[in-house]
Amino acid sequence: EVVLIDVRNTFEYAIGHFEDHRGNKAMNPSMLTFSSFDPVFCAQNAEYLKDKKVLMYCTGGIRCEKASAMLRKRGVEDVNQLQGGIHRYLEAYPDGGMFRGKNFVFDHRIAVAPTNKNENAEQVVVGRCLECDAAYDRLSASRICTVCRALVLVCECCVERIREYHCEKHLFLKNCYFTFLNVFDEEELTRQMEELKHIVATHPNAVESRRVRQTINKQIRKLNEMLKQGYVVDKSAPRRCRMCLLTSVECDGYCWGFWKR
């Protein structure tokens, strides 16, 4: 049995990944960062993968080198990788081959599509808006998770009605975790704080990661401090970018990671 694994981050997988001729997609480890591949994905899946033929890929091959070593160390012997990653694959198959969507790149191009598509062929969009599930694949630094700052897919229509965004992993905090709090009155901040406390106390699976639990408790302390000291409510405050803190009008969408100018 063959298992194909995409060892990139979730937002990279979201806009493009490999599929076979039957539409079966590569396995997505659901990583916010590659650092979780060994302690989370490998720890949970190594036993299942031990008798499988593992194929893996990433953008250029570097992460696969590390990922394959991690799996072998846990007893998975038949591990293979796509030499040169998606980048070299698309050079060899400029029509995209079995790769669907766009390849995320770490420069100002953001994402690139196969170069040799028929002009009359419709571009394959595999990404989906987290809010309305419409086909959408445009990533922007101005649209990141307010909890972990991972890039998220939110379409133009939904952007207009949402002040802050939450990635798939942190959707359970959608109604109670925000960065820019001065737009809420005391009653609303109190509600948010109580909901966060309830999540910590009653939903252990949602906060199984120690880091996530620490993040939530930090937010609870922040809310408590604001309520104690008092603050000025400004419900008309402009929407701000979670990354650069500029207003949505001022932010050019290139303030994230490798895109910074």
Image (cartoon, grey):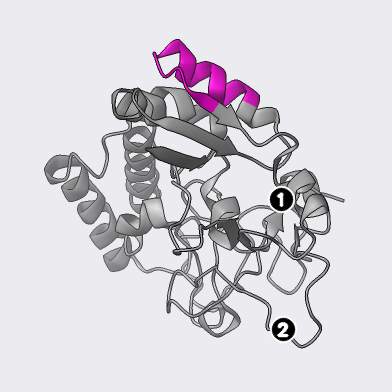
80 part of magenta stretch: no
**Residue 36: % across, % down:** 47, 30
Residue at 40% x, 14% y is: 74
In-image side of 251 versus 200 (left or right): right
Residue at 58% x, 75% y is: 136
Q: Quadrant of the N terminus?
A: top left
The residues colored magenta run: 65-79
Q: Earlier in the sequence, mark 2 or mark 1?
A: 2
**Outermost residue to the right:** 261
**Residue 213: % across, % down:** 31, 35
Which mark, by number, is residue 219? none
Please, what is the three-letter code of the amino acid marked with disc 1?
Trp
Q: Main secondary structure of the magenta part?
A: helix
Give the quarter of the image for residue 121: bottom right
Please, what is the three-letter code of the amino acid marked with disc 2?
Ala
The residue pinned by badge 1 equals: 256
* Residue 188 seen in the figure: yes
Element under disc 2: loop
**Outermost residue to the bottom:** 120
> Residue 117 versus residue 32: which sits nearer the camera?
117
Depicted 98 relative to depicted 156: above or below: above
Depicted 26 relative to depicted 249: above or below: above
